[in-house]
Image (cartoon, grey):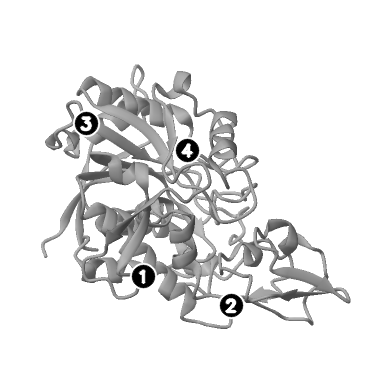
Amino acid sequence: MKPSPVYYTTLRCAIGDSLLDKLTRLAIKAGIDAIDLANKFCAIKIHFGEPGNLAFLRPNYAAAIVALLKERGARPFLTDCNTLYVGGRKHALDHIESAYRNGFTPYTTGCHIIIADGLKGNDEVEVEVPGGQYVQRAKIGRALMDSDVIITLSHFKGHEATGFGGTLKNLGMGGGSRAGKMEMHCDGKPVVDATLCIGCGNCIAVCAHDAPAITDGICQIDHAACVGCGRCLAVCPTDAISNPDDSSNDKLNCKISEYAWAIAASKPTFHITLVIDVSPDCDCHAENDAAIVGDIGFYASFDPVALDQACIDAVNNAPINANSKIGRREATDDHFTTSHPTTNWRVGLEHAQRLGLGTTDYHLIEVQ
């Protein structure tokens, strides 16, 4: 497979220019006009951010892409699927309210929000995964599958279970219904090191399935109730919670790639990623830490695998922010492994390449 073109633009702007202008030019130069958009329902798959988190993409960026699509006659809408865990996006009413609170309204973005898997997260379509190893039929939010075209608008950041979050995670995990998310997460069931647990209860507060309980001051996790979403690992202040199955994160990454492949194989897709506010953990948290590197730029491609790889390389080639969570750790050439040593982010990209979703080989084309 020959290298895929990945287009990028820096965040430098001349007087009279703007980052929104550059984002629009990037999408055009990367070939979005090759898609027939006239009168097409166009899903813009985005993460609206958990209330309290400030690292999610500003709605201004979504508005720029909406305006571009409307100029070409498309009928765009912003979309995401509901979450497994406690928070502001577990069902459609809270999800839309959270999006509004974070600035994503029809008046700020120019289009409506549709929660792809419906009110309770069970409005789904089963989609065949061509060549799937772990999943044969992915459970995808219906509105995504009812759309004619899918544009991903992704915030690039770290992630405690997958190493990084980019296009594949936005499309694959983000496109899965609540049952689909359970299917992707179900291999990893965390355990508690009693010598480290302080009984703080953070794990209880974040679990939507009542799996953790504090007994005699120590957390215990009911694996029958646990779905393996990993939220408790991220909020434990002493790292007392871990996953004993070293392969579980690998399986998660592979399943995400298979879900992304199920969607991308079914309709035209185009992908835009913003490498800014590169927080160490996912935007699903109701908080965010300092960015691990400085803001880098915007990237776009028809190939989601090449796009993710290009963004990873851009972050790894950037100096670590001294005031970030990895600023005082022993640095390696891989900022994501430094941040989350138990994850192997390469697994998902390699699996996506084997499936035929794209290639990790790319060539960069700068857009002024």
The residue at 40%/31% (across/down) is 61
Q: Position of residue 346 (x, y in %)?
A: 36, 70
- Marks 2/4: CA–CA distance: 30 Å
Residue 254 is marked as 1
The numbered dot on residue 243 is 2
**Structural crowding at the residue carrying mark 2, measured as other residues with C-alpha within 10 Å and reported as few (<14), some (14–19) or many (≥20):** some
Q: Earlier in the sequence, mark 4 or mark 1?
A: 4
Secondary structure under tag 4 reads: loop
| Callout 1: SS | helix
Whether residue 184 can be seen here: yes
Residue indicated by mark 4:
57
Alpha-carbon span between mark 3 and mark 4? 25 Å
- Mark pair 2, 3: CA separation: 44 Å
Q: Residue at x 43, y 51 (%)?
A: 174
Mark number, residue 330: none
3 vs 4, front mark: 3
Crowd band around label 4 with a 10 angstrom C-alpha radius: few (<14), some (14–19), many (20+) = many
Which quadrant of the figure contains the N terminus?
bottom left
In screen coordinates, is 300 left or right of 228?
left
Q: CA distance from mark 1 to mark 3?
A: 31 Å
Separation (CA) of disc 4 from disc 1 = 26 Å
